[in-house]
Image (spheres, helix red, strand yellow):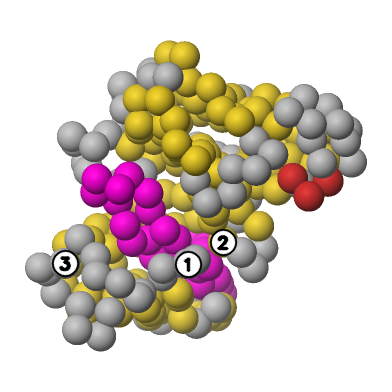
Amino acid sequence: DVKVTQSSRYLVKRTGEKVFLECVQDMDHENMFWYRQDPGLGLRLIYFSYDVKMKEKGDIPEGYSVSREKKERFSLILESASTNQTSMYLCASRDPQGAGDIQYFGAGTRLSVL
Amino acid sequence: SQQGEEDPQALSIQEGENATMNCSYKTSINNLQWYRQNSGRGLVHLILIRSNEREKHSGRLRVTLDTSKKSSSLLITASRAADTASYFCATGGGSNYKLTFGKGTLLTVNP
């Protein structure tokens, strides 16, 4: 089974802090994604990476950056956290040659910025 | 903008009943997927139906796709309390990588 692991289930940070959200997948998938999920807005794509060191902006990249130095790990960085970044963050991976469009999700990180 | 829109937003039924959720989308698709999300957790893939398929089954799940109406439905038969979750449809993928999710239907199955 594909396993996508997010480093924290719950995180509380202060405004202005630099925040790292880590995601690791164990299936050698090329593609990885970061979403945020907010009530009434559904899932919105922040960034995705189609391969190591390759990234592309999603629908709402402002205030975020990402890093993919190794195939299995995709990090989401909040350079200076703000209260409007309080949200549920979901990481996903995908094997474009295997199951195609199916994405495999981690359990999520609920981030609160105070 | 959201491609898929689920209907209804919320559905409450008794255990043993069937649950039907609908999804409408706006542009042409290669396939459509359904995912489930238990409260406070990540999404789990349920089923994928390709644009040239009209119906697909997986256990107690039945998905239909009507490309002329740009709509899909997910039927869960003989529902259980454990089916309580939010259900999302998703379109996109392929060379574009990205999936676009609807806002989901919250299904509550009462014991």
**Mark number, residue B51:** 3
Classify mark 3: residues with Cα within 10 Å, few (<14), some (14-19) or many (20+).
some
* Residue B106 image offset from top left, x and y in percent: 55, 70
Classify mark 1: residues with Cα within 10 Å, few (<14), some (14-19) or many (20+).
some
> Which amino acid type corresponds to the residue marked 1 in the rendered image?
Gln
Residue underneath mark 2: A42
Q: CA distance from mark 3 to mark 2?
A: 24 Å
Q: Is residue B78 visible?
A: no
In the image, residue A104 above or below residue B15 = above
Residue underneath mark 1: B2
Residues marked 2 and 1, same chain? no
Can you tell which quarter of the image residue B61 is in?
A: bottom left
Query: Is label 3 in a helix, a strand or a loop?
Result: loop
In the image, residue A84 above or below residue A27 = below
Can you tell which quarter of the image residue A92 is in?
A: top left
Choose between B8 and B92: the one closer to the eye.
Answer: B92
Q: CA distance from mark 3 to mark 1?
A: 19 Å
Q: Chain of mark 2?
A: A
* Residue B25 image offset from top left, x and y in percent: 36, 74
Can you tell which quarter of the image residue B54 is in?
A: bottom left
Query: Is label 1 in a helix, a strand or a loop?
Result: loop
